[in-house]
Image: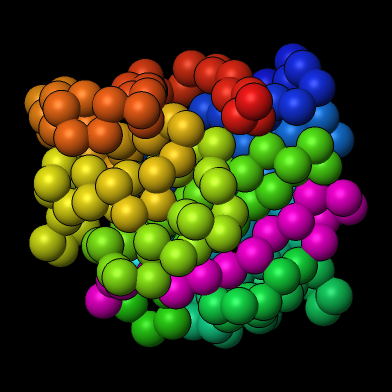
Amino acid sequence: MPIDKTPEKNAILFVWFNHYAGVLIKTPSKTLVVDPVDAKARSFQNADAILITHEHYDHLDQRLISEIQKATGCMIIADRASAKSLQHAIPVGKLQEIRPGVEIKVGEVSVKAEKCNHPAAAPVTFIITSEDGVKVFHTADSLPFPELAAIGEREKFDIAFCTVGIAPGTSPETGFEIARLTKPQVAVPYHTNSATSQTEFAEILKKELPRTACLIPELNKIYQVSKRK
Ligand SMILES: [Zn+2]
């Protein structure tokens, strides 16, 4: 699954690689991995940074992160609780704690944290902006919350990942609500092991938000998303 392709200009590639929030994002210059669990370290041999949204088992796997970090020398950007549990496993200087409102640069790629509505210690969502200005919203397993509307208006997302299951309180409807509030160009239903939940999300989206395209990802498949015109 390592992506050896490079995206076209003004585009990113992504792969969804587990039933949770595991997403690999490749910009023309950098490879970012969000919440790697249920995967092999060798799948991420080009990683420049690993981003962790919160400390739950389906998002934080200390051993895997440490293995990837050793193999690649990549930087780890993590919420406060995850950073705390990683502090002895990751070399000093390679682990950066992030909290809502803070931006960290990975080369020319920007990683900014926002709030996350999920019962964890200090969970975050991530806004990733490529060097070409492609905007990705990785919402971890957040439930909708009102500030998403202002965030969407400000950022004009090209793609948003929307949780449709597994996490407490989530459903195709709450996933749709994230899309409705943030109004991305492309909405991706994820964090589920049910194809039915993804189809339900797609149906609601088509009816209620026809200008947002739905991309139902297959696991471990590469997709390209371009900046909106
Ligand atoms: Zn989760």
State left or right for residue 5 relative to residue 79: right
Which sits in the foreground, 34 or 2?
Answer: 34
Q: Is 7 left or right of 97, judged from the image as shown?
A: right
Q: Position of residue 60 (x, y in %)?
A: 46, 62
- In this rendering, is residue 131 above or below 169? above
x 49%, y 82%: residue: 81
Q: How is the image coloured?
A: rainbow
Looking at this view, is 179 or 211 the one in front?
Answer: 211
Is 66 left, or right, of 132 in this rendering?
left
Percent position of residue 70, x then y: 77, 53
Describe residue 105's horizontal placement relative to residue 23 as left or right.
right
Can residue 62 be seen in the rendering of this structure? no
Q: Which residues are magenta?
A: 105-119
In this rendering, is residue 159 above or below 112?
Answer: above
The correct choice, above or below, for 75 with respect to 186 in the image is: below
Q: Residue at x 25, y 62 (%)?
A: 143
- Please state, as top left, top right, bottom left or bottom right, where the C terminus lies in the image: top right
Residue appearing at x 51%, y 70% in the figure: 114
Type of secondary structure dominating the magenta stretch: strand
Decide whether residue 135 is among the magenta residues.
Answer: no
Q: Residue 158: name its quadrant.
A: top right
